[in-house]
Image (tube, rainbow, N blue to C red):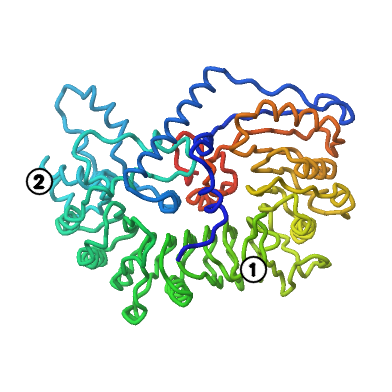
Amino acid sequence: MQLPFRHLAQQQKQTKHERSKTKPSLRCSVLTPTTSAASTPLSSPLSAAAAGRRAASLRAAAMDSMQTNMLHLMGLDETMKMVTKNVFSSLPDSPVSLHAPLAFAAAASPPRDGVDRIGALPVGILCDILSRLPARDAARTSALSTRWRRLWRSVPLVLADAHLKHTGPPPPPVSEIDQVDGLGGVLRRAVDGTRDVASVVSRALAAHPGPFRSVHVTCTRMDAHHAELALWLQLLAAKGVQELVLVHQASKLDAGVRLPATLFRCSSLTCLYIGFLRFPDVATIPRAGAFPHLRELGLCSLVMGVRDLALLLDRCPVLENLEIVRHRGLVRLRVASHSLRCVELCESTVEEITVEHAARLERLMFWEICGVGGVVDEDGCYINMCTKIKIGHAPNLRFLGFLVPGMHELNIGNTIIKAGTKVSPKNMVRSLRVLGIQVKLFNHNEVKMLPIFLRCFPNVETLYIQCETTIHKPPGMLNPKFLQQTGPIDCLQKHIKKVIIREFRVHRNELDFVKFIAERGQVLEKIVIVLAQSYSSSADRLRSSMRTFMASVKLANEDCKVIVCESPFPSDGTAWCFQGAFNMSKDPFDVSQCCNGGASCRAA
């Protein structure tokens, strides 16, 4: 099913020249108050070495070009390139790597006494070492001695088909390919699929007599190897696989390869990701088939029905993390779980999300989820399009977003939140600390919902605003008095410490909103303005404009800092890092944490 995502239509209207200018950047300027709020409260921006900025810019351009070329090699159209990129960015990294810099450093200067110090280690430590090696390297240790051969036969191995196909020097590290992109996706795994390794995977699974801890199969066109896929799942079920990432190398969004029902016999799974496949026929699923230990589930461009999703979740009694990306079917999600902590929904058609009883749910995150019915007009406004979001018992809900006024019908405590709703304690979520809203600040109907949404979450401390615009004509003007005439908002005056405004274009409506926030935020410590990608070339001029504008704003908190940044994410990026969202110690919407030199977003 072709999903009517607005950003897809907009991207296809861009010229190649326009796309070539959207390079990720990490440059920021901090505008800090120096005197009173009545005077010019801004100092000059922090300066960075010009050479460093130049080098970063060149690296960004090189990495972006590399990714474009890699996807081009697969022969995908523009839509499929975007889908593939998003799916692969949502997958977890393999727990082992072909790169071992510490081991290489030690091998450069080995001790001269010839003593086998590694072989003398206790069995438990040796097994742990082997389990951290790629399967090919772990198998090679059996040639060292009889002891190593016995160990290898019993060690839980890690198998990644991307590792099996590399027989020469290791390819460039993931960090060197994707650190600037910020998506955290391993696009190299996608392009690796241009060379088939199905037979190698079959031999590897059959050859190892012991268990498999983790298996990543992302480089195989499974439509040509359906029989092998069924065999793999049988072997993995027998060998007690714990982590399984199974992604079909699709070249188009067709009906997909049917996933064998044998998958449900892999009862040892704790982590499962499946992509570009079709859910098994319900009639073939064993009644006893379930995932009693599954804690993390990723459904990526999966073809499945509403009942299939409900059945699958019902077979996962201890599930903690759920990710649904580019779903090829209607989503009607009911959250009634004592274990679920994080739910991510991205770029899917969603009729309803109902949180009934979710005592442990901390994060409910959605991005570019389209409602059912209706259309998107030429201004990007939603006409009769609705996604119902119902929040019932969720006492630990801390993160919510991105709400879209005009399309998302928010229901709290059986009260539909709409224009004119009188917010009371019965329709508040007091546990929420971080809120994300995606809004057109030039659209009166959407802007008037902002104060109402904020009143529903009185204890919010961090507010993310994702600005939207239209590519068809300049945004209209909103009466600036509208925001100023808004009554008191408890969270804005007493609790919000940080406001991040993304895709900022320095339109009058956006400036009025900044003024509204700055003049009311009594405990506001920081306003972060992230410029739209297309405005990066004018960043210095826009900073100057912001400095002039802020001089006229009377800050409610004179110590509040204003930070102007260029966007750290590409124009087709999502609002958060998929894998980073499962790290409960981090703010999932803070995308700057994803641009950390290639380090894992899930690292503590």
- Report which quarter residue 539 is drawn in: top right
How dense is the environment of label 1, judged by Cα within 10 Å: few (below 14), some, or many (20 and up)?
many
Nearest to the observer: residue 443 or residue 408: 443
Disc 1 residue type (three-letter):
Cys
Residue 298: percent from left, percent from top: 43, 60
What secondary structure is found at the residue carrying circle 2? helix
Disc 2 residue type (three-letter):
Thr
Please name the residue shown 26% across and 67% down the image: 237
Which residue bears the numbered disc 2? 146
State left or right for residue 383 relative to residue 594. right
Q: Earlier in the sequence, mark 1 or mark 2?
A: 2
The disc label shown at residue 474, or none = none
Please name the residue shown 18% across and 50% down the image: 152
584 in relation to 421, above or below: above
Per the model, the C-alpha gap separating discs 1 and 2 is 65 Å
203 in relation to 188, above or below: below
Nearest to the observer: residue 108 or residue 29: 29
Residue 87: percent from left, percent from top: 42, 53
Nearest to the observer: residue 110 or residue 224: 224
Which residue bears the numbered disc 1? 386
Residue 228: percent from left, percent from top: 20, 63
